[in-house]
């Protein structure tokens, strides 16, 4: 089946630092998505990417859709304590538009 | 506009019992997806439904699991004869069209004792 490799698995950073995480896939996706999940809650969509090479920002978050369509990264600038949580990447194929394949997540801890 | 609603939020079942998980999509959304999440893992796709139709059930276990999305009422994920390995968080998502973003509910945490 599809595999998404998300790294790093966890990060411990100081408030104010920048963060970078990425996902790689063994196959091509037509859509890349980045979600944040807080404990006991469902994932919340942060950024959606639809075109290879696309670079999209949402406040302090920036994500890019890799040129090969097999990877994506998410950057968080000037981290704050409320950035704590688990970040997931997800990919979708054009022919299976309904189904998203998720990475295993990056757990972010921000020390004040 | 209310978000995706799931109930119950927590469900405890003994081995062999049935579990019914409900999902009410966002208003105007006719596409529903179910995902399962084990501790410290990502979400795994189970099934994708439109009103009264199963579109993709490639992630559903072949036995004991079923899903429906009737013309009226919520989508139901049904697990018969639950086993300990069914303990997980089950998330429902909805979207207005299949290429649009999926909005997730808060999940149902199933514990099988």
Image (spheres, rainbow, N blue to C red):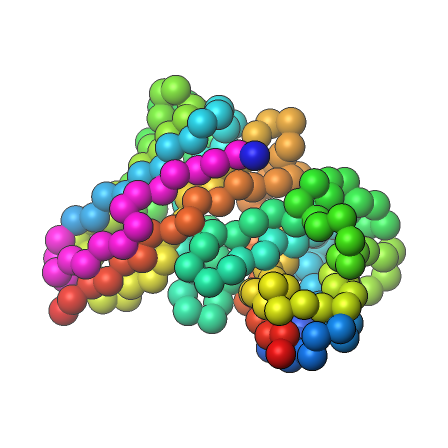
Q: Residue at x 12, y 60 (%)?
A: A14
Q: Quadrant of the C terminus of chain B?
A: bottom right
Q: Quadrant of the N terminus of chain B?
A: bottom right
Instruction: Give the x, y percent position of residue B68.
Output: 81, 56
Q: Left of B97 or right of it: where is A89? A: left
Closer-to-camera residue (B48/B60): B60
Which of the 4 image quadrants contains residue A13? Answer: bottom left
Q: Which residues are magenta?
A: A2-17
Residue B112 to residue A53: above or below: below
A15 falls in the magenta region? yes
Q: Residue at x 70, y 49 (%)?
A: B60
Q: Left of B38 or right of it: where is B67? A: right
Closer-to-camera residue (B28/A98): A98
Which of the 4 image quadrants contains residue A81? Answer: bottom left
Q: Examine the rendering and report whether any part of residue A71 can be seen.
A: yes
Closer-to-camera residue (A71/B5): A71
Instruction: Give the x, y percent position of residue B110.
Output: 61, 71
Instruction: Give the x, y percent position of residue A6.
Output: 36, 42
Q: Residue at x 86, y 61 (%)?
A: B72
Q: Examine the rendering and report whether any part of residue A46 can be seen.
A: no
Closer-to-camera residue (B84/B3): B84
Instruction: Give the x, y percent position of residue A9.
Output: 30, 50
The residue sitting at the top extreme is A68
Q: Left of B30 or right of it: where is B86? A: left
Q: Left of B72 or right of it: where is B104? A: left
């Amino acid at each position: 089946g599809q595999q998404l490799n998300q790294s790093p698995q966890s990060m411990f950073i100081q408030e104010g630092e920048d963060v970078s995480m990425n996902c790689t896939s063994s196959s091509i996706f037509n859509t890349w998505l980045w979600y944040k999940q807080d404990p006991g809650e469902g994932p919340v969509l942060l950024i959606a990417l639809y075109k290879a090479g696309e670079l999209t920002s949402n406040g302090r978050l920036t994500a890019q859709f890799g040129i090969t369509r097999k990877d994506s990264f998410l950057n968080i600038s000037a981290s704050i304590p409320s950035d704590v949580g688990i970040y997931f990447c997800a990919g979708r194929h054009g022919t299976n538009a309904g189904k998203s394949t998720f990475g295993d997540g990056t757990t972010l801890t921000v020390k004040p | 506009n209310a978000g995706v609603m799931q109930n119950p939020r927590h469900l405890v079942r003994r081995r062999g019992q049935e579990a019914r998980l409900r999902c009410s999509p966002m208003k105007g959304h006719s596409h529903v997806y179910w995902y399962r999440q084990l501790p410290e893992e990502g979400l795994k796709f189970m099934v994708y439904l439109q009103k009264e139709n199963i579109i993709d059930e490639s992630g559903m276990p072949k036995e004991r699991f079923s899903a429906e999305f009737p013309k009226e009422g919520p989508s139901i994920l049904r697990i018969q004869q639950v086993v300990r390995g069914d303990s997980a968080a089950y998330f429902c998502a909805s979207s207005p069209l299949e290429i649009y973003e999926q909005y997730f509910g808060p999940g149902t945490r199933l514990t099988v004792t």
